[in-house]
Amino acid sequence: MIKTISVRWLFLGTVFLWLTMGCAASVTQIPAGPTPLAEAPDPQGSGWWFVRFKMDRPAEETRWEKDLLIAHRVASPLIAAHEGVIDLWRFHRRSAEDKTGHQFSFLFFTTAGVADSINQVVLDDPLVRRMLADSVIQEVITDAVDHNDHPNVGDTSDPNWSSVMQDTWPYYIMGVSRMWLAMIDQVSRDSGMADDATLGEMLEHYAQVDDAINHIWQQEGYHALLHHLNAIYGYKALVYWEKRWKSF
């Protein structure tokens, strides 16, 4: 039976998946798929590490295209180069009127030695240095590698979730992050950008890429993402924010 979905429910569905997504040279290679759950990485000697990029919010406006520039030109080459030694990875995007403000984070599950190498590559990246010099990025924060506060796969999940959700959600959000990065890569290549583009031209390019991806999300996200996510769970209803049972 075909059901009519109101604009209000479409908006709430959009917000739901949006929150799950975010609570150098042209890159065309997107890393291979995640380790299967049956072969989940042994957390002994490994853990989650963060690289955080803090940005300002001029006139209380968030320049979301900066996230895309960092993901595509800084994080993606790192993921490809360390594909065999990073067990899990994901992005986290946030912006609010608080002390943290606008921050884009790259999280990855690996050993301290690999984390140290990734930290150094990020800090030495010419594009990162350029963005810092031009105040496109205010600060880059990396984790100290002499200890790890998140040694288990579920340690960066929401602590209010069940242990099953905490331990398995990282695989889901890695897939979401991979899809978003692949969309950036494809749209960026389709639109094209000069190899000698200035930083301002790069930001303008990724603003256009962001607009294109947002359009795809708004027009196709409900069926392609929300509906099919619900289908994986057998179309079972769930408790929504308004405490109603809802199927997508």
Image (spheres, rainbow, N blue to C red):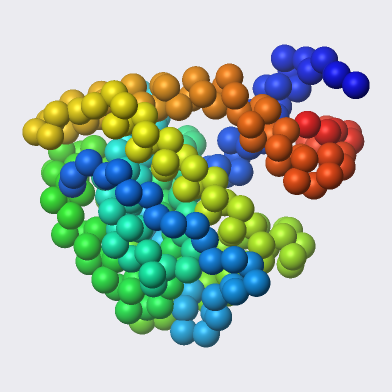
x%, y% of residue 115?
A: 34, 71
Q: Position of residue 57 (x, y in %)?
A: 36, 32
Q: Is residue 194 above or below residue 125?
A: above
Question: Which residue is at 61% across, 43% downward?
Answer: 20
Which part of the image, by quadrant, shows the C terminus? top right
Rendered residue at 58%/19% (across/down): 219
Residue at point 18% right, 46% down?
24
Residue that lies at the very extreme toward the left in this rendered image: 196
Res. 56 in view: no
Q: Please, which residue is most extreme toward the bottom here?
A: 44
Is 152 placed above or below 242 here?
below
Q: Is residue 5 left or right of residue 122?
A: right
Drawn side of residue 14 relative to residue 183, left or right: right
Q: Compared to 188, does 211 lie above or below?
A: above
| Residue at the image position 87 percent from the left and 42 percent from the top | 236
Q: Nearer the viewer, residue 79 or 190?
A: 190
Q: Position of residue 148 (x, y in %)?
A: 45, 77
Which quadrant would the N terminus be assigned to in this image?
A: top right
Count of number-bearing discs? 0
Residue 152: give x, y in percent of width and height: 58, 74
Q: Give the vertical position of 133 relative to 214 (above or below).
A: below
Can residue 116 be seen here? The reply is yes
